[in-house]
Image (cartoon, coloured by chain):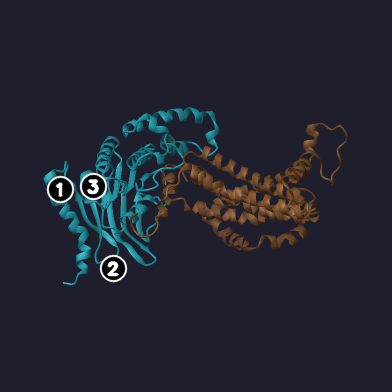
Amino acid sequence: MTGAGFQLIYAKPGRGVTWALSWLLFAAGVIGYLAISTARHRDNPEERVTPTVWQMVDGMSHAIMSPAEDSEPLPDGATWSQRLTHSMLWTDTKATGLRFIYSMALLLPAVMLGLHMGVFPYVGAFFLRFVLFFDKIVALSLLPILFIAFGIDELSKVMLIVIGVAPTVILDTFNLARGVPNEQVVKAFTLGAGDFDVTYRVVLKQIWPRVLNSIRLNLKAVMLFLFAGEMIASTDGLAYRIALLRRHMGMDVIIPYVLWVALLLFLVDFGMRVLNQKLHPWFEA
Amino acid sequence: MPLIEIENVHLAYSSLPVLSGVQLAIGEGEFVCLLGETGCGKSSLLRLLLGAERPSSGKVLIAGEARPRPDRARGYVPQKYSLFPDKTVLDNITFGAEVSEFSFFGRITPRFRERRIQLREEALEYIRRIGLRQEDSAKYPHQLSGGMQQRVAIAQALMTNPRILLMDEAFSALDPATRREMQRLLRDLWSATGTTIIFVTHNTQEALSMGTRIVVLAKEPPHLGSRVMLDLPVPEPCAEEEIPRLVRKVESASQRGKLAAIPA
C-alpha cells in the first residue's frame, strides 16, 4: 500500500458487487419488515399495524377485483373486465391519473410564459417580479382560499397543483431561455430569422429537453399537491383512499397503495427520460 | 463609396470608455484583420458592425445605411456557440435559407418541400467544399471536432450570400495545425466568393497570413478608449521574409498605448 491511509475513492467495485450492494437496503427493508410483522403477530394475532404479506395480498386482490365499499356493488355474474374496471384500485388510479394529466397539461402554458419572458425583454419586465413574488407564496396556505373561491370540486384541486408548481416551471424555463448564448440569437438573426423563428426554432428547441428534465424534477411537487388536495377534499383518488383507510387502520391496503403510487411515479419519470433521449439524440446530459 | 463606414465612433460601458473616435472605411471585397490586445475593444467594434450593439456616439454605416440590428446584411461566425446544437450539419447549413425565404407558417406549404430539396443539394455542395464527407451531414455539432464545427459555421454563414462576413476569434480555440488549415480554407473561400471579411484576432501571424489589410486597435493614452493605431495594407503575396518585420511593426503599434503609460 502506498501513501497514508485508505484510498477508497479510487476503489472500482465490479459489476456484481455494485448490483448486490444496490439491492442490499431493499433486502434489509423487506427482511426487517417480515421479522417485525411475524413477531408482532405472534404476540397478538389481531395485530393491524404491520399486516403480513398474505394479508396485504388478500387486501390488494380485493382492491383489484371488487369495487370499493362506498361505491355501488357490482351485479352478480359480472364479467372479469367489468370487475376490473369497477374495482377500487382502478377507479382510484383513474381519478388521480386524470387530475395528474390535467395538471401536466396546464404546465405547458407555464413553459410558454417562461420562454417568452426569457426571450422578449418587455414580457420579462412585465411578469418577472410578479412571478417571483408568487413563487414565494406557500401554495398549501392558499388551499382554504381556493376551496372558498372555487368550491371543493376538481377545479380547486387542479388549481392548487398549478399554483404550487407553475411558478417554479416558469422561472426555470425563463432561466433556461436566458441561458441560451447570445451568439445563437445573433447568428439566427444574421441568417435572416425573425422573432418567431428565434423564439421557437432556436431557443425553445434547444432548451426543450432541459425543460422536460425540469418538469421531471417537479413531478414530486405535482404529486405532493395532488395528494394534499385529495386527502383534504375528495371523494375518490388514491390519496383519498389512503386517508380513508387510515380511519380503519387498513394497513393491508395502505402499504400496497403507497408502493403502487411510487411505482406509477417511477414509470412516468422513466418514460419521460426515455422519451427525452429518443426525441433529442443531440442532447447529452 | 466604401461598403462599411465607421465615423468617429465612441463607445463606453457605464462611463468606462472602450472606443474613442474610431475612424475606418472598408471597401467591398477587402479582407480586414482587426488586431489588438485582449480588452482593447476589437470584439466590441465587431458587435457594432454586427448591429448587436449601438455606439455611444458616431455612426456605423453599412452600404450607406445605419443597420442597428443584426440582419442578413452581415454573416457572423463567433468563436463559440457558432452552430445550433439541436440541428444536424445539413439543417444548420440550410437554416438560413429556410428562415429567410419562408415565414414560420410558410414552411407547411408543398413549395417549401420542393425548395428544401434544392437547398439540401446546395448544402451538400458546400459540405464538400469545406472538406467534410457526405456522411458528416447527418451528424450533430457535438459529434464534430472544433475545427469541423467552425468549417460548418462558415458554410452556414456563406449559404445566405452575405456581402459582409464578420468573424470573432473564430479560429482561436483550434490547435495550430487545424488553425493553419482553416486560414487557408477561409482565404480560398474569400477569393472564390469575393465576400468582404472582417476577422477579429489577437494573433498577428494569423492576421498577416490571411488579411489584405490589418487594422490595429490600441489605447493611447490608456485611460481613454481604443482607436486605430495602425492601418496597414498587407503586400500581396506576403513574402515569408517580410513577415518578421511586419510582426514587429504591428506589435509595436499595439504596445504603444502601454508604453505611453510608463513615465519617462
Tell me which amino acid carries mark 1: Ile
Q: Are marks 2 and 1 in contact (CB under 8 Å)?
A: no
Residue at horizontal 67%, vertical 47%? A259
Residue denoted by label 1: B243
Tell me which label, 2 or 1, sits earlier in the chain. Answer: 2
**Nearer the observer, disc 3 or disc 2?**
3
Residue denoted by label 2: B223
Q: Extreme left residue here?
A: B241
Q: Please, what secondary structure does the residue beneath circle 3 have?
A: helix
Tell me which amino acid carries mark 3: Glu
Question: Is B225 left, or right, of A14 in this rendering?
Answer: left
Residue denoted by label 3: B206
Image quadrant where one finds the C terminus of chain B: bottom left
| Chain holding disc 2 | B
Q: Please, what secondary structure does the residue beneath circle 2 have?
A: loop
Q: Quadrant of residue B263?
A: bottom left
